[in-house]
Image: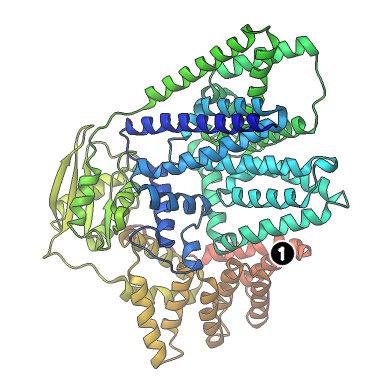
Amino acid sequence: MTMPRRWWFWGGLALLWLLATGADRAGLAGDGRLPSWDQADYLNSALDHGRALGLLPGGGWRGWQALLDLSPKIPPLASLVNGTVMAVAGDAPDQAAWSLSLWHGLLLLVVALWGRQLGGAGLGLLAALVTVLLPSLAAQRVDYVLEIPVAATGTAALWLLGRWARPGPAGGRWGQALGAALALAAAVLTKQSVLLLLLGPLLWAAATGLARPGRRLQVLAALALVLALVAPWLGHNLITTVSGTDRATLESAAREGDPGAGSLAGWLWYPRRLPQLIGWWLPAGALVGGLLALRRGGWRRPGFDQAWLLGCLAAAWLLTTLSPNKDPRYLAPLLPMLALVLAQGWAALARGIPRPWGPLLAALGLAGAGIATASERLVDRLPATAQPLEAVVAAVQNGTPATPRTLIVVPSTPQLNQHNISYYGRRGGGALVGRQLGSGSGDTAAVLAQARLVLLAQGDQGSVSRRAATLSAAVRSSGVFRLRQRWPRPEGGSLELWERRAEAPPPPDFAVVFPDLAAGLARGPAGLGPVSDAVGREHQLDGHRLYQERVRQQALRTLARSPDDRRALWSLALLATLQNRPLQADHWFARLEALEPASPWPAAYRAVVLTAAGRPWQGAAVAEAAGRRSPDPVLTALADLDGLLSGRIWQLPALQRSLPPAIEAVERQWVSPPESAR
């Protein structure tokens, strides 16, 4: 590429990004909606990470473990970047959205470079333009979720992996291998669902690389680098990541009634929605161009670069279709590759008709696509509706925003929910968090006994169960709370802030109850149900978990006087487990195991937390030793499971035999609180 042509390429790409960013900023300025559930959740995560880095008020550096605590289910890279952008641009929703513009810039860069590799600088810029014009990606550029970051990092990983996988001297270089490894790690650390995009090409590239003696060491080194970068987060949050992925895929798919991959409806689910994602203009022009190219030159076998692109697209489409949970936005990471295919069709259209009509027709067609996408974005905007959310937050904070407070939020609508209460309540160093109660049958009694501030709604309650009405009626009629302030809602009805009366019974201190709950773990599964129920509800009533430091200090004082106090040891073991400190929990469980060698439960808990710490071989040794002292089906199953996780694949038959009795034993002993106490 000559110097003038190089500047034309980079200048055109920069201009394209600036124009798209200007359109996005104008759209954000004219859109009055508040961040909804998902958007507010990701904004909260960005706030958390910005604070943890010491870049935003209300936080500071507290070490790597504290940083990794902030991303128990979704990897941290996007939140780290977004929190850093917040520190520069501001923490208002529109200001925070500058991070999306940066991710979009990375996406355009990768698409343009991939397109230039396929067909020169012109095709690279054309592919970037098509990426800008795709309706779905245009919508995602102003929607504070992770689709644009996933698309950017995933596309970069595939492009760099393909450069390394090329045959001959063009590929197989050490720099290419390490660059691809860094991009793969960045993609996985953005969101684990990117594996739907990466898994097929990654397995193929690794298999072919291992088959070539000159590339084997590169494959192993790249794999080691990816694992080294991903392992700190994954190891720290292994249990919550696995359980969160299960809820986000299997449970969510079942709840929403998504069709399975074993049905025709499942295979047709995404094809039927593709037109709304890419429109009609772009595929129509590309199809005409493709037909003209076939007529003129016939079908030609694609080279490696073309085959790699098509193979990546096909593999990603297959795995996304097989995924149980379906949503049109999950196709967003595939669309940059589709843009590369469509751009080649439009380039063929421009070449297939004699000049100047071919280029002119292509330009007019792309302009029409741009008008269609812009029109769709204008229709999708919502006017400002004067939602009272900020007024509610200001009233609760009452001039002292840094004071830790928890507001129980009963309604849950896109415009007002516990997540955006937390986001607005923590902006600028604030310490107000929103939590939701009202769906459980025991929530009413808990709120009346412990809550200090409750937000109710007259009118639309949103996505809450009918039990929320019972809670609302109890708060209004109990005499425990008084109505402090009311705000009208633009859609009708009102919001009501209720606060605990000064003369009402004070909330009990959960730190006093906690040692008894923790000591109940000595009964095994019989004590787990009450602990799970009580702690889960307390974490809603006390969003800052202020009780935990009081519990820790009291237990340590008790141990200083009496080193073998079992209630204190159980308290510290449970507290470390709740705080995701598995090795600390193992320390306290080990002391309990020494004090109670005949009980299987301290050893069983040790095996579980050691597995969570990424040390299943130690967990297996603990469970096996305890099983020899006190045979128990749960210990047997844990020993077999940890042995299998340690690499002893020959223990799979033993696990298949031991697991059913262990599950039966746990279910038989599990005691849930009575329905009236929930």
Q: Quick check: 246 above or below 253?
A: below
Q: Quick check: 194 above or below 454?
A: above
Please provide percent x and percent y for residue 543.
Answer: 33, 60
At label 1, the amino acid type is Leu
Please provide percent x and percent y for residue 152.
Answer: 57, 40
Report the residue at 62% width, 80% height from top.
630
Q: Is residue 147 visible?
A: no
- Front-most of residues 561 and 662: 561
Report the residue at 39% width, 82% height from top.
555
Residue extending farthest to the right is: 213
Image quarter in which the C terminus is found: bottom left
- Front-most of residues 324 and 516: 324
Instruction: Give the colour scheme shown.
Output: rainbow
Report the residue at 48% width, 69% height from top.
63
Q: Residues within 10 Å of mark 1 (few under 14, many from 20)?
A: many
Is 176 positioned to the left or the right of 526 in the image? right
Q: Is residue 616 visible?
A: yes
**SS of the residue at dot 1?**
helix
Tell me where residue 342 sits by quadrant: top right
Residue extending farthest to the bottom is: 561
Is 136 positioned to the left or the right of 424 in the image? right
Tell me where residue 449 sits by quadrant: bottom left
Residue extending farthest to the left is: 503
Residue under pointer 1: 644
